[in-house]
Amino acid sequence: MNATTTTLPSTLKLKIDLTDDQFFQMCQKNRDYRFERTASGELLIMPPTGSDTGNRNFDMVVELGIWNKQTKLGKGFDSSSGFTLPNGAERSPDVSWVKIERWNALTPEQQEKFAPICPDFVVELRSRTDSLKELQEKMQEYIENGAQLGWLIDRKNKRVEIYRPGKDIEILDNPASLSGENVLPGFVLHLQQIM
C-alpha cells in the first residue's frame, strides 16, 4: 500500500453550513482541534498549539486565575472556551475574562455552550505559525464586538499590541509587563516567561 502525504495550511478555512447546535456538537466530538467560525460562516480549523506555546498560554491563564480568585470580579477562560460574538462569529481567545455581572446575566444554558457574549478582556498569543494579519483582524473584531481591552502578544517580534475601544492601537516593544488597567484593576502580567 502506498501512502500519500498532504501538507495542509496551518489554519484550514472551509465554507460549511452548520447551525449553532451542529457547530457546538462538532466541537465537542473533535476536542483535539480548535474550531472557530467567522461572522460570514467560514469554518476555521486550527491544529493544537505546540507544547511551548501551550505552556506560555498556561502561564497566562494561571496568572489571570490567581488575580481573579483574589478579586472575584469575573470569570476567566482558557483557549478551549468558545464565545458567540454579537456579529455571529464564534471565537476562542487564548485567554479571556468576563465581568461577573455580565456572566451572571446569562442563563445556565447559555453559559453551558458557546456563551453569547464578547469577553471584556482577551489575549491572543502569536505562535510560530500564526498569521499576524489574521490575529490583528481578530483583535479588532473583539473590540468591535464589545471587548474593553485586548492584548496581542507577538513573541516573534517581541512586541505587544494593546487594543481598546475608540483608541488607536498601542504598540509596546519588548515590555516587561502589562497592566490590566481599569478593566482588570490591579492585574499585572509579567512577560519574561511569556515572550
Image (cartoon, grey):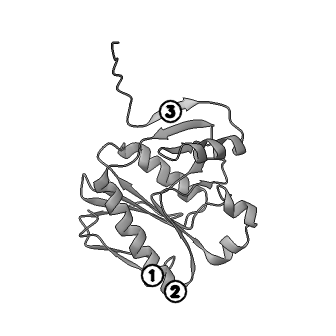
Please name the amino acid that badge 2 sits on: Thr
- Residue 184 rendering spot, x and y as whole percentages: 49, 78
Measured as percent of width and height from the top left, residue 119 is found at 57, 64
Q: Mark 3 — residue?
A: 13
The residue singled out by tag 2 in the image is 71
Among the 4 quarters of the image, the one containing residue 169: bottom left
Q: Quadrant of residue 63?
A: bottom left
In the image, residue 188 sits, relative to residue 82, either above or below, namely below
What's the amino acid at mark 1?
A: Trp
In this rendering, the answer to whether 158 lies above or below 98 is above
Furthest residue in direction front, as rendered: 1
Q: Position of residue 28 (x, y in %)?
A: 60, 48
Crowd tier of the residue under label 3, counting other residues whose Cα lies within 10 Å: few below 14, some 14–19, many 20 or above: some
Mark 3 to mark 1 CA distance (whole Å): 36 Å
Q: Which mark is residue 67?
A: 1
Gap in Å between the C-alphas at discs 1 and 2?
Answer: 6 Å
Q: Quadrant of the C terminus?
A: bottom left
Find numbered disc 1 in the image and state the secondary structure of the residue it sits on.
Answer: helix
- Whether tag 1 and tag 2 are in contact, CB under 8 A, the answer is yes
